[in-house]
Image (cartoon, rainbow, N blue to C red):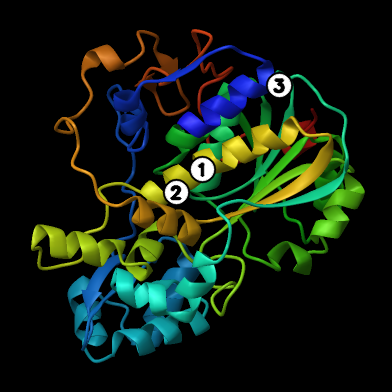
Amino acid sequence: MAVAGLAWAKHVGADSVTVDRRLASFWFFVSIRSQGWNLPPAWDPIAGDYLAKDRWIRLHTNAPNHRKAAVEVLGSAGDKAELADAVRRWEADSLETAIIENGGCAAAMRGVGEWQTHPQGESVAAEPLFRIERMGTRSPRLLEGTRVLDLTRVLAGPVATRFLAGCGCDVIRIDPPSWNEPSLEPEVTLGKRCARLDLRVREDRETFERLLEEADVLVHGYRPEALDRLGYSGTNLHSLRPGLVEVTLDAYGWTGPWALRRGFDSLVQMSTGIAQAGMDRTCAERPTPLPFQALDQAAGYWMASAALHGLTQPTGSRTRVSLARVAEFLIAEGFREPSEPFAPETAADLSADVENTSWGAAKRLRSPVLVDGTPLEWPSPPVPLGSTPKDALAW
């Protein structure tokens, strides 16, 4: 968050940036507090850690197609207890491979040393934290009114574009017709307009291309080659919008045998040794990842800073970030004891203003970032995905 704040300050020519570390840490958990209503559960009922024959494995089943893939491989559509019995009949690596090959998401738990000698771990370690390519010339603009097209999903990309919206950018988030994030929408759609487009349909492609042609920034979290298959390779994107600042995220890095692998924060924490290190350090009996989605949150603010940096440059750009490379960075930093015990926020940390969201009244944590004494400020409360009709989409 501090890096993103510094990038914002540089872009607007500010003299100072300050970050309240305590407040920033709260934003890594959840920034909104509902007033008389509750968020849906964040996890699918069968998602979680299971003990296989030889080690732990995590199944990520929040998306219906990912749940279906895991259930098909395990041959069990029952509750977690039945699923656990099925998992115990597998070696973790074999089950991980089978679920991935069936279109699902899973990660066997590895230690830090094991990851660092794994072919994918070695490949990720050789990648830069930011992988930047320059792409043609662009005309600089002030940040207010900068147009950001957001094609991201859970969770890093939405964090990035939420920060950009708070900096004054005009953010339009586009989701496919069937995608939903009910537990996250009040948290991450703050200050955005949200619509749905199917990029396999001609009329929706025309709407997307019209938005792209006038956008300054495109942020997306598709796996490598996913946009290519829809006809939107990097070359095509930058031909449609010369000077575009493109920022993209994947899970396991942009090189190596796992470059195309699906993944999420919780899975990458299992793969890279973070969950194993937490288990060892706390003498726990099961995987112990960080108490929040640190890779997503950190990657999100890196992505926001990459977008802001790109806006200061005379050329367009494509910046690639990955959760695995962020994990490598955090592991290299090492564990540090907190200077003070971590505790839930007090009422003083909540804004005095009430947000009238689509779900009900809520309060938001105060902005942890101040640029020349000015906090982040969002133009509108959070909204459900798809709440903006596609025929109303325009900058």
Query: Mark 3 touching mark 1, by CB under 8 A?
Result: no
Q: How many marks?
A: 3
Density class for disc 3 (Cα within 10 Å; few <14, some 14-19, many ≥20) is some
> Could you say whether the residue bearing mark 2 is in a helix, strand or loop?
helix
> Residue 240, percent across and down?
90, 48
Residue 63 visible at all: yes
Residue holding disc 2: 296
Question: In the rendered view, would you say 248 is above or below 264?
Answer: above
> Could you say whether the residue bearing mark 1 is in a helix, strand or loop?
helix
Q: Nearer the viewer, residue 85 or 344?
A: 344
> Residue 189, percent across and down?
53, 33
How far is disc 2 from disc 1 in space, using C-alphas?
A: 6 Å
Of marks 3 and 2, which one's residue comes earlier in the chain? 3
Which of the numbered marks, if any, corresponds to residue 143? 3
For the residue marked with disc 3, what is the amino acid? Leu
Residue holding disc 1: 300
Question: In the rendered view, would you say 156 is above or below 268?
Answer: above
Query: Mark 2 touching mark 1, by CB under 8 A?
Result: yes
Question: In the rendered view, would you say 191 is above or below 387?
Answer: above
Residue depicted at x 41% and y 60%: 62
Residue depicted at x 57% and y 76%: 256
Which image quarter: residue 38?
Answer: top left
Which image quarter: residue 285?
Answer: bottom left
Residue depicted at x 37% and y 47%: 294
Density class for disc 2 (Cα within 10 Å; few <14, some 14-19, many ≥20) is many
For the residue marked with disc 1, what is the amino acid? Gly
Residue 109 visible at all: no
> Could you say whether the residue bearing mark 3 is in a helix, strand or loop?
loop
